[in-house]
Amino acid sequence: MCGIAGFFNPYRDYKTEETKWLGILSGMNHAQKQRGPDDEGTYLSPICGLAHVRLEIIDLVTGHQPLVKAWQGRECAIVFNGEIYNMDELKAELLLEGVKFQTTSDTEVILEGYMLHGRDYIKKLNGIFAIALWDSASEELFLFRDRLGIKPLFYTMTGETLVFSSEIKGLFAYPGVEPVLDRDGLCEIFALGPAKSYGKGVFKDVLEVLPGQCITFDRTSCTEDFYWKLESHPHEDSFEKTVEKTAWLVEDAVKKQMLSDIPISTFLSGGVDSSLVTAICAKELKKQGKVLNTFSFDFTDNNKYFKSNSFQPSQDRPFVEQMVQFAGTNHRFLECSNQDQLDCLFKAVDARDLPCMADVESSMLYFCSQVKEYNKVTLTGECADEIFGGYPWFHSEEAFRTDAFPWSMSMQPRQALLDESVIHELHMEDYARAAYEKTIHETPLLAGDTPEEKRRREIAYLNLRWFMVTLLDRMDRTSMYNGLEARVPLADHRIVEYIFSVPWEMKCPDGIVKGLLRHAGEGLLPKEILWRRKSPYPKTYDPTYEKLLGDQLKEVLADANAPVRTLLDTKKVHAFLNSPSDYGKPWYGQLMAGPQMLAYMLQVNYWLEKYKIRII
């Protein structure tokens, strides 16, 4: 994994001040160096500059970027963040077409494929990627993003110059691009956050290449189109055939994503998703005489303070221990203290460039820093709940009948600490409703859908476009901040394409949550784990942590210069701090309840201050 950046302006000649512009490219690299601590490079043509920082996973010796190829007077250059999991098959095809490779990298496969077949070659890639590709012959710059938006790519226009970067902070390293927040940006933070509208970067004029999108810039125009969009198709397979295909897709995706020139590991929670990934990886490595490293996460003294609720019915450790024995992995139990997750609240903002999922994100960032001490590549069980219908709101009558984001149905808890003038000015309900309805209108439906199946499809599509992307962003930023590559095999686009069209009675047979995935895992896992009731990512229930948050927020409000003071109602905050916490009624997703609201506001304050954001 890596970080990419660059700029394009058809009315400049960057070569006339080459030292200056190479210095700016180096500055953009420096801004996101944590994404690629192992190597860096730059490329400059008269109207285009590319920059790259590298985390070495594949082709450790010759994988330097930007990669430049010249043939018959045509020069092409590429910077690439991601992994192409079907690289071997694609390379074999290109070899038959006469291509001579100088490296063993997937980057060269992409560039050679483009030079031979054009930009539609992107459709052949199975992987996760953000790509910038410059073609000197046509004087075109292409920006590509993978089908599900697993790898980030932001851009903005400053005058006639396009500036792009893997992370928002890279944009701010370009002269004249400043962090500005308007009313829409405030609504993104308070009405939708920690989610954000797809295609938007929250900051004014900062945009994001959409999943499955290609944007082409040339001397006269900017063209946006999609090389992939999710579609609904009639599902004609029997349940038995559906289980068989699902099992094959899952196993093939995991095996493909084991591609690495260095040892891999997995996150193991003891739930069905991470356990399936772990079982397949462990089995494959055993064939090579190797033992898989696995890691599980919890919080210090959580066995003492844990409170079972409808979202989190049981602790993970007993199931992890059973899975470790079953798969024969080399396992490490990692724990995060109250102080660690408080300290990492602000590192998580540095990583995301935005307020994020509070301690749900900060603790993941901490755990990734610990995993990196042992492995630089890990596979996770992320995204199964969004794809196979694992969350409570897939099964809730209230969510089914409410025209709102099912993980955040009420605006009231989001406004609990805000000043009334802010609430009055922002029109948060209207903003959230417009964002929700936009996605509803885009949902790929079938003409024969019943009203019930139509709503099922809408909820599934909302999850793929919003909730899953929030978690993918969390996984990308927290891992890459620590120089760790975290892969998500269950988000293979082939799985998403197939499962989206599977009717609900097959996804959830006999009312069993994620029943299709469980049936597909028969024979791979112990029964107790395969059919275990869902339990999400853990969080702390230690009241000491909430007190730490409350004390820190009081300190912030006591500071006359704290930027968040203009947005919060001090009386509301103190009343909130004195009221009992309700861990069972989150305001976002399953885990973000009372304490996470305090943590989120601390993140907002830090973000406004650290990035010196101007609110207009």
Image (cartoon, rainbow, N blue to C red):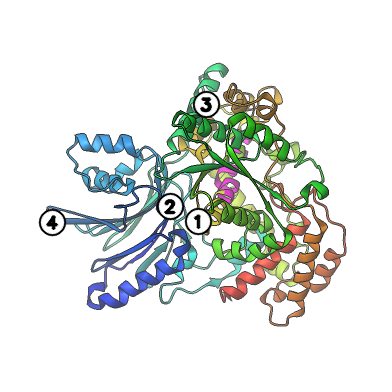
Q: Which mark is in front, 4 or 1?
A: 1
Dot 1 or dot 2: first in sequence order is: 2
The residue at 79%/61% (across/down) is 546
Task: Quickly name the residue at label 1.
Answer: 480
Amino acid identity at mark 2: Met
Amino acid identity at mark 3: Thr
Which dot marks residue 111?
none
What is the magenta segment's predominant secondary structure? helix
The number of callouts visible is 4
Amino acid identity at mark 1: Met
Q: Note whether residue 192 is visible.
A: no
Amino acid identity at mark 4: Gly
The answer to which of 466 and 600 lies nearer the viewer is 600
Task: Quickly name the residue at label 2.
Answer: 1
Q: CA distance from mark 3 to mark 1?
A: 30 Å
Q: Residue furthest front?
A: 289
Q: Which mark is in front, 2 or 4?
A: 2
The answer to which of 376 and 613 lies nearer the viewer is 376
* x, y percent for residue 615: 59, 75
The residue at 50%/53% (across/down) is 484
Q: Are marks 1 and 2 in contact (CB under 8 Å)?
A: yes
Which dot marks residue 246?
3
